[in-house]
């Protein structure tokens, strides 16, 4: 028997007042309305339905591919990566998304702090893990405590472009975080980029020019051990998509 830990944030309406790029809107159709639809479509009245009820259905009226726990494709970062057309989410190999995982714990880092190569090396030594080809790297910040609030996107440390490249060079193709994004908060990067008038500061780890996937807006990473688990994070097969929602789950041996 295995134990499953849900690493996905709930998909629910809101937060109210949020811009469309981060908001989710859902139209819930109750059973009574479903009965009316069935009668209109098939001529089957409520008297022929159990308890007079029809189907309940739900319609996303606003759901961006980045609005919930999701997997980014290289196409999200740039149109070309390493001189080639960037891959969309449906073009990525499935075997990237079911692999052993390891957890780097940076939950005590303050907002805007940059996680560098030396930080990752020290954390790997602390937990006693050696990265294997295609391991999935998860970064714990505990910023999932802000899920469902307008301030979620304003918090968290971020992984540097150098550390992202370092992980990629060791065979990691999927990297995930429980903050709003893999980079440090965008408002901080924006202020620095404008002050210095330099490219490569804003969204630096995303635009690292490497073909990898990020999982963003994870949850419950505090329930994981440092290693010894498998991550399942299959994205929806959205043709041409820059990303897709995923139900991300950690699978632990029952002895852990």
Image: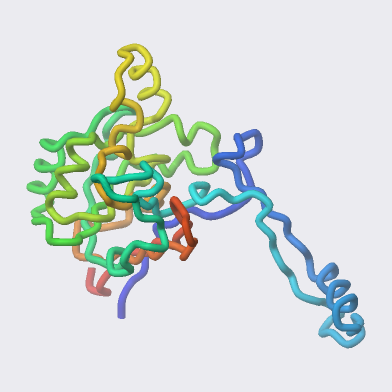
Q: Position of residue 93 (x, y in %)?
A: 31, 66
Q: Is residue 40 left or right of residue 184?
A: right
Please name the residue shown 27% across and 35% down the image.
108
Q: Is residue 251 visible?
A: no
Of residue 106 and residue 100, the one placed in the foreground of this image is 100
Q: Residue 215's x, y, as percent?
A: 36, 51
- Taking depth in this image into account, of 200 and 227 the one nearest to the observer is 200
Q: Residue at x 46, y 65 (%)?
A: 237
Q: Residue at x 51, y 51 (%)?
A: 65
Taking the spot 32% from the left edge, 52% from the top edge, the residue there is 213
Q: Is residue 118 above or below residue 239?
A: above
Image quadrant where residue 14 sits? top right
Q: Quadrant of the C terminus?
A: bottom left
Going by the image, does 108 lie left or right of 4? left
User: Which quarter of the picture shows residue 160?
Assistant: top left
In the rendered image, the quadrant that contains the N terminus is bottom left
Residue 52 % position (x, y) = 87, 79
Q: Residue furthest top?
A: 195
Looking at the image, can residue 184 be seen?
Answer: yes
227 vs 19, nearest the viewer: 19
Q: Tag count in the figure?
A: 0
x and y, in percent, of residue 68 in the image: 50, 50
Give the quadrant of residue 113.
Answer: top left
């Amino acid at each position: 028997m295995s134990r499953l830990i849900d690493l996905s944030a709930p998909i629910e309406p809101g937060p109210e007042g949020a811009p469309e790029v981060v908001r989710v809107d859902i139209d819930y159709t109750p059973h009574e309305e479903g009965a009316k639809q069935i009668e209109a479509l098939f001529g089957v009245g409520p008297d022929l339905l159990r308890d007079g009820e029809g189907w309940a259905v739900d319609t996303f009226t606003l759901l961006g591919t980045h609005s919930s726990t999701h997997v980014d494709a290289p196409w999200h970062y740039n149109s070309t990566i390493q001189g080639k057309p960037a891959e969309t989410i449906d073009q990525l190999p499935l075997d990237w998304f079911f692999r052993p995982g390891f957890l780097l714990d940076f939950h005590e880092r303050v907002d805007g702090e940059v996680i560098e190569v030396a930080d990752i090396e020290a954390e790997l030594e602390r937990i006693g893990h050696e990265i294997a080809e295609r391991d999935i790297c998860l970064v714990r910040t505990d910023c999932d405590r802000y899920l469902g609030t307008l301030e979620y996107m304003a918090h968290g440390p971020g992984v540097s472009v150098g550390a992202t490249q370092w992980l990629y060079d060791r065979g990691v193709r999927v990297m995930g975080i429980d903050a709003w994004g893999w980079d440090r908060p965008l408002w901080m990067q924006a202020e620095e980029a404008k002050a210095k008038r330099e490219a490569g500061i804003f969204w630096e780890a995303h635009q690292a020019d490497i073909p990898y996937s990020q999982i963003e807006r994870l949850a419950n990473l505090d329930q994981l051990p440092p290693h010894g688990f498998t991550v399942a994070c299959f994205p929806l097969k959205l043709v041409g998509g820059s990303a897709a929602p995923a139900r991300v789950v950690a699978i632990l041996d029952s002895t852990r």
